[in-house]
Amino acid sequence: MTDGLDQALSERFALQHDELSMPDFADVLRRATQITSRTEARKRPSTHRLPATLGVRRVLIAAVAVAALVGVGVAIATSFGAFSGISAAQHPQGPADKLDPALAAAINAENAHENGLGAGKLLPDSARFIRQLAGGERIYALSTTTNMLCVLLVGQPGSNLGDATSCGDPLSQNEPTTITSVQPDSATPPLAYGIAIDSVASVSFTAAGQEVTVPVKDNVWAYQGENSGLDALTVHFDDGSTALLHNGVSTS
Amino acid sequence: VNDLEAEIERIYRDRYVALCRVAASVTGTVETAREAVQEGFALAFAHRAEFRGEGPLEGWVSRIVLRAALDTRRRSASSLGVVLDETREGTLLWTPELPHADRDPALAAAVGGLPSRQRQIVFLRYFADLTHAQVAEILGISPNTVSAALHQARTALARQLEQEDAHAQEVQQ
């Protein structure tokens, strides 16, 4: 049965094939050079505040559907779409929200190389500082020209954590938290963190074989340590209900 | 480093078609798949020094290409630039789709009914024409796991296709 079925499946899948001509490898080399240049450009201001994100070992991004705008203030109307459901981000930009000039310049430089993947250009002026983690890392919410929600983590000056950005659609009840995990090197435990909507009280997942529950404070949760169970994360809401997210998406 | 450069170029030549098919099952079109493959290989080449040899280079490069395709589809690439994700966890985000479902709706329906991991393995084996060992490299699982999952998937597909094809014949008549 198997050989015949193998053959039949191969033939049916072959109907899905398109003609493919292989571009010269020089195109790969040209793109690689551009990536290296951008990386170097980002490394240059790292002596101030911007260590590179290279070495990030794992990034899981929870993306979500757009929720309705609520309570929009004129001054920050554009940000509310991306920040919908995130009270800690819904305030006019103040001094604490301003990104370090070197970091903002690096973001703007990267915007010039925007790669057409649809995330749009990151808007440094949309940054809202949300919370500083126990290790000193600062979590910001930013929006993009396509109204996506981006989570920016800025490491302590001099730390090897660096900065990391992950973007997705604005949060919703169905996908109520972002999930990102960064690990600058194998000697440093990974740092998992996310921005959650207001109704989320905590999240839990399996870490090193143990169930850990991480409270949400000011719309942010964070956990440093082994987190291999992060792709199955349970969200605990204020009303006592829960939702299981597989790779950031609710299964309920 | 020179060896790695040559190896990545070899993988590009050997695996280009297979990885384009994998990418097409993610992005939905050949054009975006080709772009994702170029970007993925460029990422791998630019970050080749980060390859730690914890597994075959082919698997490492293939996972980066797969992630590049996923980023294309999910519109979730870092606006700050490069986010290198060569991890096995990254492959969990992949739910392959037939690029031309209209050419074989019965197959599309049957494949759509498979659990996610089985579907990935079926695509890598039959759509990308990869061997069990190559599938295992990409997904970061053992060849035995591939064989077992493929066996289950084939059984399910055979049953489902039989029903779908019979239904299609009834409709035609």
Image: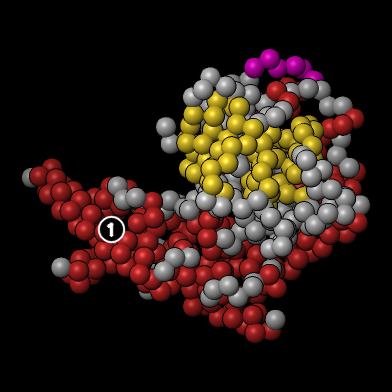
Q: Is residue A108 left or right of residue A243?
A: right
A164 versus A150 height, above or below = below
Question: Residue A134: where, in percent of width, then height?
Answer: 78, 40
Residue identifier under label 1: B153
Of residue B46 and residue B146, the one placed in the foreground of this image is B146
Q: Is residue A153 left or right of residue B148?
A: right
Q: Could you say which quadrant of the image residue A198 lies in?
A: top right
A16 versus B93 height, above or below = below
Whether residue A8 is visible: yes
Question: Residue A183: where, in percent of width, then height?
Answer: 69, 56
Q: Secondary structure at mark 1?
A: helix
Q: Is residue A121 left or right of residue A241?
A: right
Whether residue A23 is visible: no
* Start-end of magenta stretch: A70-75
Other-residue count near label 1 (Cα within 10 Å), few / some / many at <14 / 14–19 / ≥20: many
Q: Residue at x 56, y 69 (%)?
A: B60
Q: Is residue A134 magenta?
A: no
Q: Residue at x 67, y 53 (%)?
A: A190
